[in-house]
Amino acid sequence: MKYITLVVALLITSITWSQSNLKEEKIDINSLIEGTLLVPENQETLTLAIIIQGSGPTDRDGNQPNAKNNSLKYLAEGLSNNGIATFRYDKRLVKLARQGNLKEEEISFDHFIDDAEEIITYFQNQERFKNITVIGHSQGSLVGMVAAYRNQADAFVSIAGAGQEIDDVIVEQLQRQAPALVDDARQSFDDLRVNGIALNYGEGLASIFRPGIQPFMRTWMQYNPQTEIAKLEIPVLILNGTEDVQVDEEEAKLLHRAKPNAEMYLIENMNHVLKEIAAGDTMDNYKSYNEPKRPVVEDLVEKITVFINALEK
């Protein structure tokens, strides 16, 4: 049940200089979206990568209140140190929670897509960058592919993105981790999809079907990643780690099947928070979710760098 909770668990204001020869700009896109732009110092960069985080109240660095791993911070810094500007941002849930205004029953999956679209439009209107690549991690993969299509981004990267609708992903997880809950979950998801509400679920599924989260789950279920990725007529890169216990590598293969001209790589020993894990080491995998000093896998940064650099050729 721990993994299930993880799955279902926003004007330039200042400029500073990082220790890695990167210019850092704090940017407010709107009243709910705040982020960090990293631009390589003394280098004319033509490409921007917008990084969209995964599920839950995730900030620009990839962290949540009980899981600090700095995964997206290290990804952004790695790409920017390779000459690619990056923008990463706090999810609107973070700002709403800080304000004391977070009401989960009012959150829609479409809000996250709207936020991503507004960010893409912000940088497109600036005309500061020639190419804009959208990078979506986990839940952000689906958010990113929809936003990239609607706003005509130049390329898209999926990291640990699901290849099925979210209800099917969760049912498959339950099949592996808690098979006794599968029938109950399937029926509840079907009720939610058809009737807009699920009532007859057991206590073991309360984290997924509690009344406050049902409206959000229903809007998330409306999007099929295979359908959305197939719409993209831009370069696409699909990545997944072989040690990802939240999103199985088969999900990447489903995305690739829907978009066969995309590049796809399975990154050896990478887990869901982009850290290197010894094969099959479950304890190390859990531990890495709260290890902010552990770097992300170098091969991940390199594959994205090569993919993005090819856009300028």
Image (cartoon, rainbow, N blue to C red):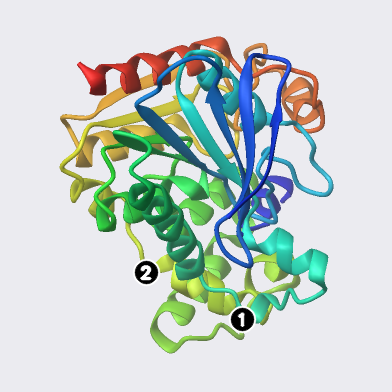
Q: Residue 18's spot in the image, x, y percent?
A: 71, 22
Residue at 74% x, 47% y is: 2
Q: Is residue 251 above or below residue 180?
A: above
Tags 1 and 2 touching, CB below 8 Å = no
Q: Circle 2: is it few (<14), some (14-19), or many (20+) Cα within 10 Å?
A: some
The amino acid at mark 2 is Gln
Left or right of 246: which side holds 203?
A: right
Q: Residue 244's spot in the image, x, y percent?
A: 57, 29
Instruction: Give the labeled residue for mark 2.
Output: 222
Left or right of 156: which side holds 15?
A: right
Q: Is residue 112 above or below residue 49?
A: below
Q: Is residue 292 above or below residue 294?
A: below
Camera-nearest residue between 155 and 269: 155
Instruction: Give the labeled residue for mark 1.
Output: 106
Q: Residue 34's spot in the image, x, y percent?
A: 64, 53
The answer to whether any part of residue 156 appears in the image is: no
Q: Quadrant of residue 193?
A: bottom left
Where, quadrant-wise, is the C terminus in this rendering? Answer: top left
Left or right of 26: which side holds 223?
A: left
Q: Circle 1: is it few (<14), some (14-19), or many (20+) Cα within 10 Å?
A: few
Nearest to viewer (mark 1 / mark 2): 1
Tag 1, which secondary structure? helix
Residue at 57% x, 15% y is: 269
Q: Quadrant of residue 100?
A: bottom right
Residue at 55% x, 57% y is: 29
Q: Quadrant of residue 275?
A: top right
Q: CA distance from mark 1 to mark 2?
A: 17 Å
The answer to whether any part of residue 87 appears in the image is: yes
Q: Residue 210's spot in the image, x, y percent?
A: 69, 76
- Lower sequence index among marks 1 and 2: 1
Q: Is residue 88 above or below residue 236?
A: below
